[in-house]
Image (cartoon, grey):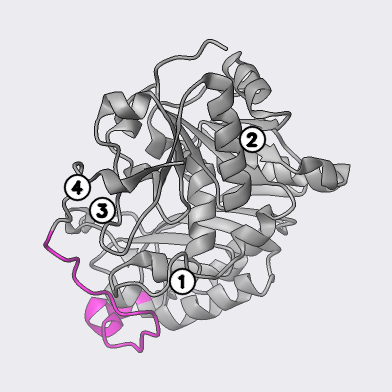
Amino acid sequence: MTVSSSPLVVVGICSPERRRYAHALGAATGRPVVRVSSSPSTRVPLARSRDESERVILDVDATVDALHLEPCLRSPAAEIICVVDAVDLLDDLFDDAPLAEPTAADDDRGDVGARARRAVSQLESASHVCIVNWERMDTASLSVLMSLVAHLGPTARARLSRGAADDLRALRAGGGPAIVDNVLERAGWVRMLNDEHDPYLTDPRVTTERYERLLPFHPERLVTALDMLDAGRAGRVVRSAGFCRVASRAQTLARWDQVGSAIWIDPLDSTMESSLTAQELVFTGIDLMPGAVSRVLDDALLTATELAAGPEVWASWADPLPTWFPAPTAILERDTSTPDELDRD
């Protein structure tokens, strides 16, 4: 098989399937397989050089965020292959387990739902999605799964795996969506906010919808709305992401990041505080009822009377959301010189 010199990065939340696939890909391409793993002292392991990363298959452990694998992912030609176990995908997207335990207080790998968050981020950043163990699913369930993959990562080329060598040959031959070079612009929610969401594979049970409002959320009613969505009052919400404002913290635009039963609402950089955006969210789910997500969230918006009360009153309201702490000023330096971070299998 003739292959380019671009990096081949293999990710997947199911470690046995990912590792088997990485080794099969290494055998097919003639490249050695390098396992990239993290340790408590080094959260972002790196290849020692661009040349090194381009000569190997990087088998990236689930505890490592593939988006942080510098320098190889800065190359426009970088290929991220997400290996998905068809049988376990939905369970993985609703898995509220931490990725690593124990962890430091500022290490989000210990968050509730961190495993589900990593599973969805791998799908959203992938250039190729290879679905294994699909033979064990019925046709209707497989259609829903493939459509969900396409909604979450609409720029990725998805394939029911027939072996690593055959997959790579077929995926690189073209067909399907045009791969987006910028990894951060591959996610379905980003594509929807940019009016570019066009999943290649569809199923009537899987939908993605946009929610935009100018009013901020009331903090207590927002928590009630989140509980209702998690309970399935609008259908099965698998993924939602975007930007929001909460009235009690109205001076700061927040990032909304939900997958499965876990949600993070975190402050964004202070340079975005002057934005006029209130709610700009994207929801992807299975069997979502038309208009139901909007109705649930609309009940959490400020009323006209509450809006007229103004920010000073809003700031005095009870706020059950987690406290926002200032971001640490120290910058973690990435160690590019320690050979232990790349463990050759």
Return the disc, 1 or 3, that comes first in the chain's sequence. Answer: 3
Labelled pair 4, 3 in contact (Cβ < 8 Å):
no
Mark 3 crowd level (few <14, some 14–19, many ≥20, 10 Å Cα): few
**Could you tell me how far apart the alpha carbons at marks 2 and 3 are, in whole angstroms?**
39 Å
Q: Is residue 199 above or below residue 137?
A: above
Apparent side of residue 259 relative to residue 135 in the rendered image (left or right): left
Q: Secondary structure at mark 3?
A: loop
Q: Please identify the quadrant where the N terminus is shown.
A: top right
Q: Residue beneath label 3, please?
A: 275
**Circle nearer the viewer, 4 or 3:** 4
Residue 130 numbered mark, or none: 2
Span of residues in magenta = 307-330
Q: Amino acid at mark 4?
A: Asp
Residue 301 numbered mark, or none: 1
Mark 4 crowd level (few <14, some 14–19, many ≥20, 10 Å Cα): some
Determine if the magenta segment contains residue 310. yes
Labelled pair 2, 3 in contact (Cβ < 8 Å):
no
Labelled pair 1, 4 in contact (Cβ < 8 Å):
no
Q: Residue beneath label 4, please?
A: 335
Which residue is outermost to the front?
345
The quadrant in which residue 123 appears is top right
Q: Can see residue 307?
A: yes
